[in-house]
Image: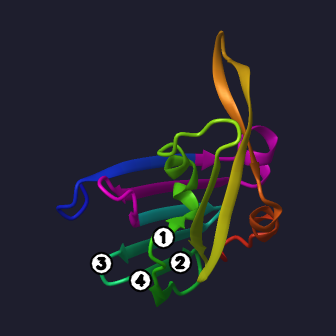
Amino acid sequence: MWNGIPAFHFSSHIKKVKLIGTLYPYVQTVDIYCDRAKFQPLYADVHIHYRKKHQHTEIRLDQATLRGEEIENTEENGSDPTHRKKFLGVTPGAQGLFTVLHFLRTFPLKPGYRVEFPVSHDERNIPFVAEGVKLETIKVGKEERETLLLKVESAFARVFANVRSEPL
């Protein structure tokens, strides 16, 4: 549940490890809530810790009014905290960057199956287009799993090849 709406909750925790993590400590935690009935993003809560900086970003989306807001707070030792708030337009049916993989699982994916939907990111809408190529068996730990290789059209991949990170 999120604000009284039945919702899926997806959470991820990313951090650099080993020598890189020692030299450049970085931890990102992302919590996403999606409407269970429509599988539309409702809320994203992102925490980024990098050395002495902490950035907290909240994104609230209202699919009914097609409006959203992004609130970002950044704190760094020795500096005044910054606060940024901006309003967003929401594209009907659009997924967020963090929900693409989860949303793909709602389709009957198989070789030859083509899927297309908009993805909103950084105030842009990019069409996500992919086609199932072939089934593959991969080994995960000690077990084997059947997977589907997807070919993502290059227009989407190009846009995100050089995605800027939110400033820290």
In which quadrant will I find the C terminus?
Answer: bottom right
Measure the alpha-carbon separation of dots 1 and 2: 6 Å
Whole-number angstrom distance, CA of label 2 to CA of label 3: 30 Å
Query: Left of 29 or right of it: where is 3?
Result: left
Mark closest to the chain's N terminus, 1 or 2: 1
Mark 2 Cα shell of 10 Å, populated few (<14), some (14-19), many (≥20): many
Which element carries disc 2, helix, strand or loop?
A: strand
Q: Position of residue 130 (x, y in %)?
A: 70, 53
Q: Are marks 2 and 3 in contact (CB under 8 Å)?
A: no
- In the image, taking residue 4 as reference, residue 29 lies left or right, namely right
Residue at x 44%, y 75% (from the top left corner) = 92
Stretch of the chain drawn in magenta: 14-43
| Cα–Cα gap, marks 3 and 4 | 14 Å
Q: Quadrant of residue 155?
A: bottom right
Label number found at residue 139: none
- Label ID, residue 74: 2
Q: Residue furthest top?
A: 142
Q: Residue 21: within the magenta?
A: yes
Which kind of residue does numbered mark 2 sit on? Answer: Thr
Is 89 a magenta residue? Answer: no
Label 4: which residue? 69
> Residue 105, relative to residue 75: is it above or below?
above
Location of mark 3 (residue)? 64
- Find numbered disc 4 in the image and state the secondary structure of the residue it sits on: strand
Q: Residue 14's spot in the image, x, y percent?
A: 60, 48
Q: Nearer the viewer, mark 2 or mark 3?
A: 3
Q: Amino acid at mark 1?
A: His
Q: Earlier in the sequence, mark 2 or mark 3?
A: 3
Q: Residue at x 43, y 72 (%)?
A: 58
Cβ atoms under marks 1 and 4 closer than 8 Å: no
Mark 4 crowdedness (10 Å alpha carbons): few <14, some 14-19, many ≥20: some
Question: Disc 4 marks which amino acid?
Answer: Glu
